[in-house]
Image (cartoon, rainbow, N blue to C red):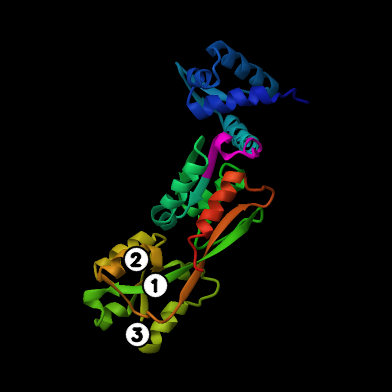
Amino acid sequence: MERNLELNHLKYFYYTVLEGGVAQAANRLNVQQPVVSKMLKTLEENFGQPLFWKKGRTKSLTDYGQLIFRHTQVVFAEINKIQHTSNHPQEIRGLLNIAAAEPIANYLLAPVFTKLITEFPNLNYNVHTGTQAQVIDLISEGSLEAGCFFYIYNLPKELEIATRIPFRFKLVVKKSEAKNVDVIQSFIGSREIEDLSSHKFPTVDLLREKYPDTRITFSSNSITLHKQLVKAGKGVSIMPEFMVKKELSQNQFVDLYPKKKFVWDLLVAKRKSSHFSSPAQAFVDKLSALGEK
């Protein structure tokens, strides 16, 4: 059956879900509540099935409603990008939805967004730090414009690496344990060991040249947890320099290989079918400026 869908109907549905109810959507769209309710009813009639379950005064999305909402997220994300085509950054409004792995969000993004907020003062910013699988799904759906990672286990075919930004890493140990062979031989697993297909762990191999009994004693996706374990004297770990710069300068950590240069790329992923909005491109440019020169 051919449906007579209008963008306006989808807009009322999208904001009802986004804002958490009809009243909130009406307030956001500056219309009366009956207008929103009528639009939702028309949309349900067009689809031939309910988008919401109603229980008392509360509404929750049906399975079909959830599917339609995911599609509207993509639609309005693209509309948002069109609105970003202004040549005057001060006039750009809307949302910039970015995802970032935990250490990137915690240690790198504050100065980036400080500059972005000055350049795009009327833009709203959302930064997501969920699991990599969750974030990759959101980028694939178009709900997020880009994601920043040091490692991506399995990149879906609809995504691509838009930018690679090199960052220096340091192999560190707690200063008080710098001569403790047992601690140095205990490697706290980093992003290297997540790719089980290669079975090559260059940092571990390097350590074994001097400390032949080196083994991976702990593995986690959280590099912040690695840092805490190093602080507790439980082993050595390789981490982005920006995460341990303070500890190195304050002599809490020791760089085991100060003359060796470890560099890995920060990966910026996006959908192949999309182009960065001007704020997203500005975000990438400012993040790139922080990388290894």
Q: Are marks 2 and 3 in contact (CB under 8 Å)?
A: no
In whole angstroms, how far apart are the C-alphas of marks 2 and 3? 26 Å
User: Which residue is located at x 51 percent, y 34 percent?
Assistant: 122
Residue 108, placed above or below residue 192: above
Report the front residue among 258 and 191: 258
How far apart in space, not on screen, are marks 1 and 2 (Cα)?
8 Å
Check disc 3 and report the residue beneath it.
213
Q: Residue at x 61, y 48 (%)?
A: 140
Q: Residues within 10 Å of mark 3 (few under 14, many from 20)?
A: some
Q: Position of residue 259 (x, y in %)?
A: 40, 82
Q: Is residue 134 among what the camera can see?
A: no
Residue on which the image places disc 1: 170
- What secondary structure is marked by label 1? strand
**Residue nearest the viewer, comparing 233 with 165:** 165
Which residue is pictured at 52% across the width and 49% down the height?
135
Classify the position of the N terminus by image quarter.
Answer: top right
Q: Position of residue 162 (x, y in %)?
A: 62, 57
The amino acid type, in three-letter code, at marker 3 is: Asp
Give the labeled residue for mark 2: 244
Q: Is disc 1 surrounded by few (<14), some (14 to 19) or many (20+) residues within 10 Å?
A: many
Give amino acid for label 2: Val
Residue 273 visible at all: yes
Q: Earlier in the sequence, mark 1 or mark 2?
A: 1
Find residue 20 and report its horizontal and vertical position in percent. 47, 26
Residue 163, relative to residue 121: is it above or below? below
Instruction: Identify the magenta region.
Output: 82-97
Q: Residue at the far right: name it.
A: 2
| Residue placed most toward the observer, 39 or 285 | 285
Mark 2, mark 3: which one is toward the viewer? Answer: 2
Three-letter code, disc 1 = Lys
Left or right placement of residue 76 versus residue 260 in this view = right
- Image label count: 3
